[in-house]
Amino acid sequence: MPAPSRTVALPTPHGTMDCFLAFPPDSSTPRPAVVVIHEIFGADAHIRNVAERFAAEGYVAAAPELFPREVRAVLTPANIALAMQSLAQAPPELRKDPGKFAEFAATQPPERRPVLEAFGTVTNPSVQAGFAEDLLALTTYLRSLPEVDPRRVGSVGFCFGGAMSARLATLDPELRAAVVFYGQNPPIDDVPRIRASVLGLYGELDPGLTGTVPLFAEAMARSGRSFSSQVYPGAKHAFFNDTRPSNYHAESAADAWRRTLQFLSASFDPDGLP
């Protein structure tokens, strides 16, 4: 019998983090594990469903909630849409400077300021470095579970979570595989610390991210690390999320799922493990 899905409260360097765990039908022997990292909306029903899909494929899947409760309350889809309206009129480099971002948020209509402030918090590079440390605590925890083969742990992230999947790879030398669904590059100076193989999946109609992929690929090549990527024609940002009809691209999502499973299977091949 499979172990029942459950939510655990995991101690991390920055407090306690809730994490949804889903187990495969057969967990009588240690299985590979995948950390499923959420979008800007937090570990919602869609992300838990993705974790359960991985479990059905034979993985122990862990979907952590990285955001504090007060941030989750603000980062709703409707509020995020308001923030995007403001950010569409702002220079792209604004997100790289927390001070300037805060100044920009203060100039926006009152109803948009709380979500812009929350958005600025979770995209702040120093805050994201802390999130990566929390994810490292999670991969360490997973390796301690009897249901998990500690040599076969990877990560898959979407949008914000895609960026965090790559950041985790810079921090965890034992991570075997990292999948980046339309997420920002990790700090390029940190790329030489990556030991995992990395797969990037992007939409053609998401040029702000797609245009940065060659920089990541070049940095991985210089470090002698494995990086592969796919850009889907006609696909927007968040093309994998079937709860967002305006972005979901069924053909691309199906192919990305197939590629992800193939990539993880190859990365976790026992013959290639130390």
Image (spheres, rainbow, N blue to C red):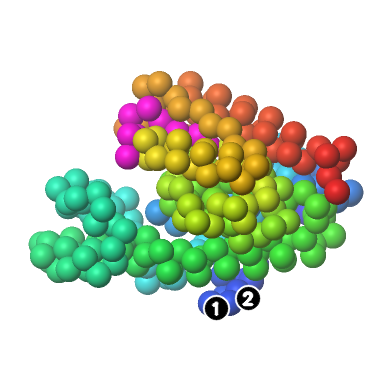
Apparent side of residue 138 relative to residue 46 in the rendered image (left or right): right
Are the two marked residues, 2 and 1, in contact with CB atoms closer than 8 angstroms? yes
User: With respect to residue 248, does 224 lie above or below?
Assistant: below
Three-letter amino acid code at disc 1? Answer: Gly
Residue visible at 19% across and 46% down?
88
User: With respect to residue 238, does 173 lie above or below?
Assistant: below
Residue 87's spot in the image, x, y percent? 21, 51
Q: Which residues are magenta?
A: 200-208
Whole-angstrom CA distance, mark 2 to mark 1, is 6 Å
- Residue of label 1: 15
Q: Is residue 133 magenta?
A: no
Three-letter amino acid code at disc 2? Answer: Pro
Answer whether residue 169 is visible to the viewer in this image: no
Name the mark on residue 11: 2
Residue visible at 46% across and 64% down?
128
Answer whether residue 144 is visible to the viewer in this image: yes
Viewer-proximal residue among 68 and 193: 193
User: The residue tagged with tag 1: helix, strand or loop?
Assistant: strand
Residue visible at 32% across and 50% down?
77
Apparent side of residue 9 relative to residue 116 in the rendered image (left or right): right
Name the mark on residue 134: none
